[in-house]
Amino acid sequence: MSDSRIRTILNFIILNIFRNLLGILRSKIIAVFHGVSQIGLLGQFLTFNNLQSRVVTFGITASLINSYNYAKIKNWSKDEVIAFNIFVVLAANLINTILIGVFISALTVLIYGSLEFKLFIWLGLLLNYIYSFSSVLELSVQAEQKFNLLWKARGWGILVALITVVPLTYYFSVLGIIFNLIILYCISFLFLLTRGKLRFNIKKAKLLFKFNKDIASYVLKVAATDIVRSLFVLGSLFLVRVFILHYFDLVTSGYFQAIVSISNYSNILAEGFIVYYFPTISSIKNNDRLRQEMAVNLEILLYIIVPFIGLLMVFSRPVLNILFSSEFILLQNYLEVLLSAKIFYLLYYFYSINFLARNFLKKFIILEGLRSVLLIGLVMLLSKLFAFPGAVYAVLLTDILSVFLIFVLSHKLEYFKIAGSNLKLLVSAFILILILFLIDLPIVLEMAVLLVLFVLFFDVKKYKQVISRFVK
């Protein structure tokens, strides 16, 4: 992997670290000054908002980048490609606003259990208008592979959000967090609009209503696949949260939100890769090069993710105390379960994104549909059998079964097969995480075990090379 490629990935990983620092500050202030129930309330808002945001962007994460890469092959106008994606987002937002307006009372009770939170729904609508059009600009820049410009836009948004997050959250609790999110996306949007030298500008707005049938057909096909996937993934998470709120209570929902949010910090590494990886893998036509690209990226990802998850497991107790409060330390074992699940999830995520990038749309939808059904079914079943621990272990079981499913669906695709070196690395990672999960020692001894296992199972020289190239 070239130095410029690694530096690009590093830049976005750093941004994701600071973005997650925002989440840490929000959660800490809420936990200390507003209580566990407000953590639960925050979790409900974020889960529904994530689902909504994918609905209003209507799959353009995949469709804009894919159609942009196909424009040269198909002799399409790239301006018309961007214009139609903007039109799709505008239409999705308007339809979403109408539906939310009609069913707002029922939605408020379903999500929050009380009508007093209607304002959260309306502010969520405003947030998603800003987010969706900011996403269009960001994806246009990403499709052109202007990664430095994208990095600056996101960076300014995160910087201003970091400055405002403490007073807003302290004084206004969850409402302040919503305002902070609005600021985050507004800054990124305005930066790209005023400084981005964008390919698509207001002078070309007339293209919004000039449809190329081939472009429209392709964009809608890919977008529909991605939106179905989002409805499966985020819809299942939303239903799980609603189930936990109504089957248990808001406090239990707060506990679940706490451990899920910490385990999701490992996603900052994967998301940093995907910014570079998805447009790159979408543009590769040669199978040998594709196989090589997948192998190299998986290796780099594992070398960074495994130590990160290992450290979170070793320091799970102080992490819960620092990020939330001493009240959350009782969740230590459950947090380690979800961290163990992350190895399986990230492997699943890495390979599933290739289905979308290579236009295996039917397999992609089947895969996401089965995973969503598994998650909802297992959480409901195991919660009724084993209460809250059942819900946590249901996530682990879902991620393990998802990896099995993805290899069943891809076993005939030669370039999807795991390289021998990657397979060895994966087995080592699973063993290391399993040992850390099973042992219960003082932090110093667990840290020593982690170091010994890492030296035994991983190529330390290669790891040093990866890190040195990151910080060069």
Image (cartoon, rainbow, N blue to C red):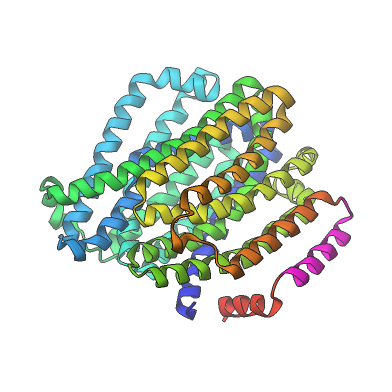
The quarter holding residue 93 reads: top left
Q: Is residue 82 above or below residue 382?
A: below
Q: Residue furthest front?
A: 412
Is 315 on the left or on the right of 204, as rendered?
A: right
Q: Is residue 140 left or right of residue 310?
A: left
Q: 407 or 312: nearer the eye?
A: 407
Q: Is residue 44 left or right of residue 209?
A: right
Q: Which residues are magenta?
A: 440-457
Across and down, in percent, residue 153 comes to: 40, 61
> x, y (%) of residue 41?
58, 31
Quadrant in which the C terminus is drawn = bottom right
- Can you say whether 454 is above or below 93 in the image? below
| Front-most of residues 166 and 300 | 300
The residue lying at 77 percent from left, 71 percent from top is 456
Residue 441 magenta? yes
Residue 58: tell me if it is visible: no
**Which of 146/70 is in front?**
70
| Residue 249 shows in the view | yes
Main structural element of the magenta stretch: helix, strand or loop?
Answer: helix
Percent coordinates x, y for residue 185 in the rendering: 41, 50
Q: Residue at x 41, y 53 (%)?
A: 355
- How many numbered discs sit on the rendered protein? 0
Q: Which residue sits at x=72%, y=55%? A: 312
- Residue 106 is one of the magenta-drawn residues: no
Compared with 208, 237 (above or below) is above
In x, y percent, where is residue 314? 78, 56
